[in-house]
């Protein structure tokens, strides 16, 4: 299994690491536009050295209750960073956005993959993604970021998400997006209770057997904080446990903050499988 974007090929026969690069002001305490930009590039470069095959760039925090970010603000945060990384580093770049215009300009600036937590449901997103002809990650979310954690409920969380995937895949196929360009992601923490998240983790293999590359993002999430009583900075061990549980059930891409540690876990898993 592999992903193709332009002249790039990503081998998915072994799990790949997607490093998170948040270019939202709240993710840079030091402030200042220039420092902000330099810091982002340095972080990206470090993640590549540590084993990231993809750098995921997000200009809008999807924190529950977060203020929405304007189109211009999201563009001004992401596009210059994408251009610089595309110019300086040999790595896949994904744009973490739900806005059609941001997708369009990000791909024009050098992004190779669209990562949409809204699975191309926003106005114009499906059409733009089809025109871009790059792989797209369709993530499941129940509700919207501002309200998704109010009272998540499902008949059967795994079945409901699978039904959602089938609906979105049909919409993509009708829009002219090739099956080979679709990646699926159950969206840990997006409209799920603690138990829903762990049920999904337990049954993750079901999703990897749907015939599409599977991306998972558990890194430092509240499913660990709430269960363990740990702050965001204290969730590395749990996040690495999550990486291993996902990789052993067929996840092809793991979206993480801690690239070096995640790379080490995947190398140990690979060595074990090959011994
Ligand atoms: N495909 C894919 N994209 C993603 N973007 C994110 S933002 C998330 C975070 O903790 O990074 C987050 C959630 C809530 C607040 C802040 C940040 N999570 C995913 C994911 O799980 N899958």
Image: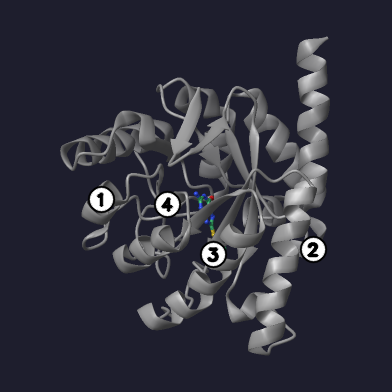
Quarter of image, res 159: top left
Does the CB distance between marks 4 and 2 fall below 8 Å?
no
On the image, numbered disc 3 is attached to which residue? 82
Of labels 4 and 2, the one closer to you: 4
Question: Which comes before the other along the chain, label 4 or label 3?
Answer: 3
1 and 2 marks in contact (CB < 8 Å): no
Residue that label 2 marks: 233
Question: At 79% across and 49% down in the image, what residue appears?
Answer: 49
Query: Is residue 13 placed above or below 224 in the rendered structure?
Result: above
Quickly name the residue at label 4. 114
First in sequence: mark 1 vs mark 2: 1
**Distance CA(mark 4)–CA(mark 3):** 13 Å
Percent of width and height locating residue 90 = 65, 49
Question: Label 1: which residue?
Answer: 131
Q: Secondary structure at mark 1?
A: helix
Which residue is more in the foreground, 191 or 75?
Answer: 75
């Amino acid at each position: 299994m592999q992903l193709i974007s332009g002249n790039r090929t990503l081998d998915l026969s072994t799990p790949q690491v997607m490093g998170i690069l948040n270019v939202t002001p709240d993710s840079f305490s030091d402030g200042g536009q220039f420092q902000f930009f330099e810091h982002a590039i340095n972080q990206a470069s470090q993640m590549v050295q540590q084993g990231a095959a993809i750098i995921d760039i997000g200009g809008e925090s999807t924190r529950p209750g977060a203020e929405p970010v304007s189109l211009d603000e999201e563009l001004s945060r992401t596009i210059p960073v994408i251009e610089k990384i595309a110019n300086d580093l040999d790595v896949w770049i994904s744009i973490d956005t739900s806005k059609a215009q941001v997708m369009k300009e990000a791909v024009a600036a050098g992004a190779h993959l669209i990562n949409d937590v809204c699975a191309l449901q926003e106005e114009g997103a499906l059409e733009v993604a089809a025109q871009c002809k790059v792989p797209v990650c369709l993530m499941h979310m129940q509700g919207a970021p501002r309200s998704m954690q109010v009272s998540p409920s499902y008949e059967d969380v795994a079945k409901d998400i699978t039904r959602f995937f089938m609906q979105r895949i049909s919409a993509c196929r009708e829009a002219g997006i090739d099956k080979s360009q679709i990646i699926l992601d159950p969206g840990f923490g997006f409209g799920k209770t603690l138990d829903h998240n762990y049920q999904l983790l337990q049954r993750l293999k079901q999703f990897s057997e749907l015939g599409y590359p599977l991306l998972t993002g558990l890194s430092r999430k509240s499913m660990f904080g709430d269960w363990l009583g740990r702050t965001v900075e204290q969730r590395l061990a749990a996040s690495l446990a999550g990486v291993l549980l996902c990789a052993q059930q067929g996840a092809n891409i793991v979206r993480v903050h801690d690239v070096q540690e995640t790379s080490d876990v995947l190398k140990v898993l690979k060595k074990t499988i090959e011994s």
